[in-house]
Image: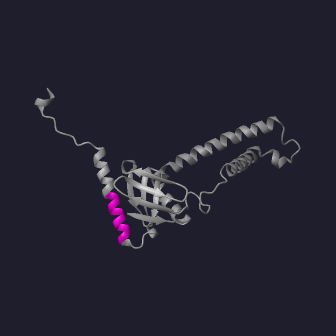
């Protein structure tokens, strides 16, 4: 079975949001640690600026607020640094994420082909297959998946047949991965 997909940015972002739901619990920890690091670095920067007498010629209101100024400088530096490190958008036309791609399934795995690349993921390498309201997700690990938008199919029957066939192949591969256990009788163990 084969389907050609030209995903849209909105579809990909929606699927990525769906895939990241299990990790949302960690956001509180990440926010807490980030705040702690920002306060520590701002305190260090504030003390450093005091020792260097950086604000000696400044008005008294500014000299009295070393810490908030240090926090603002740290924030501006962080934003500038991140913006310089992450200038590339994944969603530029004909980029990796929005590239038109043809997906084919057979007994060996999920095959993907575009103008610039092609590859196969064997069914044993797919963690799970999930259907959302907008797409089929073929998970490679907990946070990475191949996305096949449902609008790539001519109709829902074609989409259902594709998913049913994919799940059939995937389940067959999973059964091959888990060896059938044979019961051991007490006589054989001795």
Residue 67 found in image quarter:
top right
Count of picture labels: 0
Task: Provide the major secondary structure of the magenta segment.
Answer: helix
Image x and y of residue 47, in percent: 75, 37
Residue 158 lies within the magenta run: yes
- The answer to whether 172 is drawn above or below residue 66 in the figure is below
Image coordinates for residue 173, horizontal then vertical, percent: 31, 50
Q: Nearer the viewer, residue 26 or 69?
A: 26
What residue span does the magenta drawing correspond to? Answer: 157-167
- Relative horizontal placement of residue 102, taking residue 109 as reference (left or right): right
The quarter of the picture where the C terminus appears is top left
Residue 74 lies, in percent from the top left, at 71, 46
| Position of residue 77 in the picture relative to residue 133 (left or right) | right
Q: Furthest residue to the left?
A: 187
Which residue ends up furthest to the top in the rendered image?
190
Instruction: Name the side, left or right, on which 24 lies relative to 68.
Output: left
From this view, report whether residue 109 is shown above or below residue 57.
below
- Which quarter shows the N terminus? bottom left
- Picture residue at 47% right of the left edge, 62% below the top: 102
Please name the residue shown 43% across and 65% down the image: 3
Q: Is residue 125 magenta?
A: no
Q: Which is more toward the observer, 4 or 41?
A: 4
- Residue at horizontal 42 percent and vertical 53 percent from the top: 139
Q: Is residue 5 left or right of residue 82?
A: left
Q: Nearer the viewer, residue 36 or 167?
A: 167
For the rendered model, the colour scheme is: one colour
């Amino acid at each position: 079975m084969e389907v050609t997909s030209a995903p849209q940015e909105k579809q990909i972002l929606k699927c990525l949001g769906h895939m990241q739901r299990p990790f949302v619990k960690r956001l509180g920890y990440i926010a807490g640690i980030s705040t702690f690091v920002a306060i520590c670095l701002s305190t260090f920067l504030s003390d450093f600026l005091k020792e260097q007498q950086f604000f000696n010629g400044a008005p008294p209101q500014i000299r009295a607020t070393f810490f908030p100024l240090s926090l603002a400088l740290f924030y501006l530096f962080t934003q500038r640094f991140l913006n310089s490190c992450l200038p590339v958008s994944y969603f530029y036309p004909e980029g990796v994420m929005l590239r038109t791609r043809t997906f084919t399934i057979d007994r060996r795995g999920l095959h993907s082909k575009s103008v610039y690349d092609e590859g196969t993921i064997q069914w044993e390498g797919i963690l799970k297959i999930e259907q959302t309201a907008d797409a089929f997700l073929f998970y490679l690990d907990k946070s990475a998946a191949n996305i096949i938008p449902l609008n790539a199919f001519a109709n829902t029957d074609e989409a259902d047949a594709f998913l049913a066939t994919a799940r059939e192949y995937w389940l067959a591969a999973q059964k091959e991965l888990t060896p059938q256990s044979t019961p051991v009788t007490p006589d054989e163990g001795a």
